[in-house]
Amino acid sequence: MGAVLKGGTLVELEPACVERCDLRIEAGRIVERGVDLEVRPGDEVIALAGRLVLPGLVNAHALPALSLARGLPALRPQGDDPLPPRLALRRTVEAALDPTATQVAGAVAALEALYSGTTTLVANHASPAAVDGSLLRLARGFHEVGTRGILSYAVSDLGGAVAREQALEEGVSFASKAQGRFRGALGIGPLGAISDEGLDGVQQALETSPGALLHVELAESAQDGRESLARHGASSVERLLARGLLGPRSLAAHLVHLDWPELSKVITTGTWMVHAARTNMQSEVGYAPAGKFGSRTALGTGGLAGDLFAEAQSAHRRSCDAGQEVDVLRALANGHRLASEAFGFPIGPLREGAAADVIVLDYRPPTPLTAETLAAHLLDGLGSRHVEAVMVDGVWRLWARRPLGLDPDALAEEARRVSAALAASLAT
């Protein structure tokens, strides 16, 4: 007994494929694909009448904490070498988070992602005032909504050596316990804000956490690179390479302020390179040359709402403006490859054996939709407004644009209360 999605138009991203086909889903996996599949006794049949069926999207760099910062004013730059205002705001918000705020932020970020057809979030988190158990609280927020999560704690020396070690322990502890729809990763915050001892600790922790990904925020601001050189006598990339912290099990987000020799070194390691065009523009940190990132480019939304359709469209337009076009179909498909590596089974292909993470879109193409025209439809037509239903791990989590098992009004009310308390604490 399973669920049969009948009469849909199945869309896969790379290689691009558009095909009228049915899917059978059992025990959280796709078990059969074919034209006019036989319905068995006890099957749940979902008649899709030509609606598009896509794999759930993967947000390769998310900052859930900032879902509670919306509307808070950016901070005025201070000091001789100030952080950009939005980055300063992020640090201030994270420093004020308690366990309840962390869980609420996770639920808000996951729900906004779900509405947009995103089913997996690769999230880097920090809450210095409440480190212990913070990734578990974040996971609980995701669990309320039903999304997948690959969660890491951003290790840094911003709060001193003791806080750094607590952050490292939190990441290792969660990675050892994560199961089901969750996996743990190890995280690094701004490279200028982590000591060589901290990087050594991350290196050692990776050796004792087999299979864990490393989530690095690299060269987002020019200040970060200057701090790394001034405090530690080496560039951010040099410090990571010296410890073997870049490679196929690493993902590096942003990569704005790297010259070509450094960028090429990162590329040759096989590191996943995550472009976050919209958040870079909002933070006014500059443009990452994503057109040069190569075949392991993925997309993330940073501190903005997790709409990968909007992210792909912005990334494409910004890259065209810069004269180096980003292949957004590959970048979105790479999110699935990254998630598949983290979870240890296929996520993304609408094929037998893959996770049943699918989204249903009510999109009526005004021109032919084929493998050849798929990119054009994604960039000029398809959007989160077309998402009608979302399934994660074989369970419907959104139906007729209504979340199942969660009261979105109650969550919004709680989030406003928590955000107001957060804003009040920042004002004192």
Image (spheres, rainbow, N blue to C red):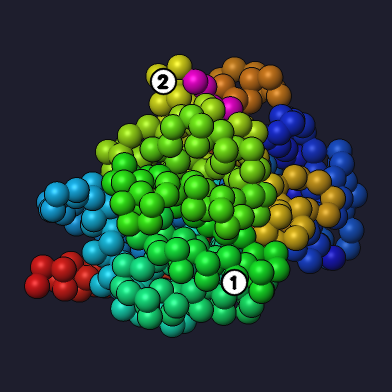
Callout 2: few (<14), some (14-19), or many (20+) C-alpha neighbours within 10 Å?
some
For this view, does 82 lie left or right of residue 113?
Answer: left
Q: Residue 254: give x, y in percent of width and height.
A: 44, 43
Foreground of the two, 280 or 161:
161
Picture quarter with the C terminus: bottom left
> Can you give x and y, in whole percent of width and height, for residue 332 in the image?
60, 39
Kindly give the residue lying farthest to the left in the view shown: 428
Left or right position of 227 against 149:
left
Secondary structure at numbered mark 1 = helix
Question: Toward the viewer: 272 or 265?
Answer: 265
Task: Give, as a three-letter code, the residue at label 1.
Answer: Ala
In which quadrant will I find the N terminus?
Answer: bottom right
Question: For the point 41% across and 59% down, which residue is it?
Answer: 189
Label 1 and label 2: CA atoms lie apart by: 39 Å
Q: Which residue does the numbered mark 2 point to in the structure image? A: 322
Q: Is residue 245 above or below residue 364?
A: below
Residue stretch rendered in magenta on the structure: 324-328
Whether residue 221 is visible: yes
Q: Few, some or many C-alpha atoms within 10 Å of disc 1 (few <14, some 14-19, many ≥20)? A: some
User: Which of the two discs, 1 and 2, labels the residue nearer the N terminus?
Assistant: 1
Under circle 2, the secondary element is: helix
Residue 121 in sight here = no
Q: Nearer the viewer, mark 1 or mark 2?
A: 1
> Residue 104: horizontal and vertical position, in percent?
38, 71
Which residue sits at x=26%, y=72%?
96
Please state the total of marks drawn on the protein image. 2
- Give percent across and percent down for residue 3: 77, 58
Circle 1 residue: 205
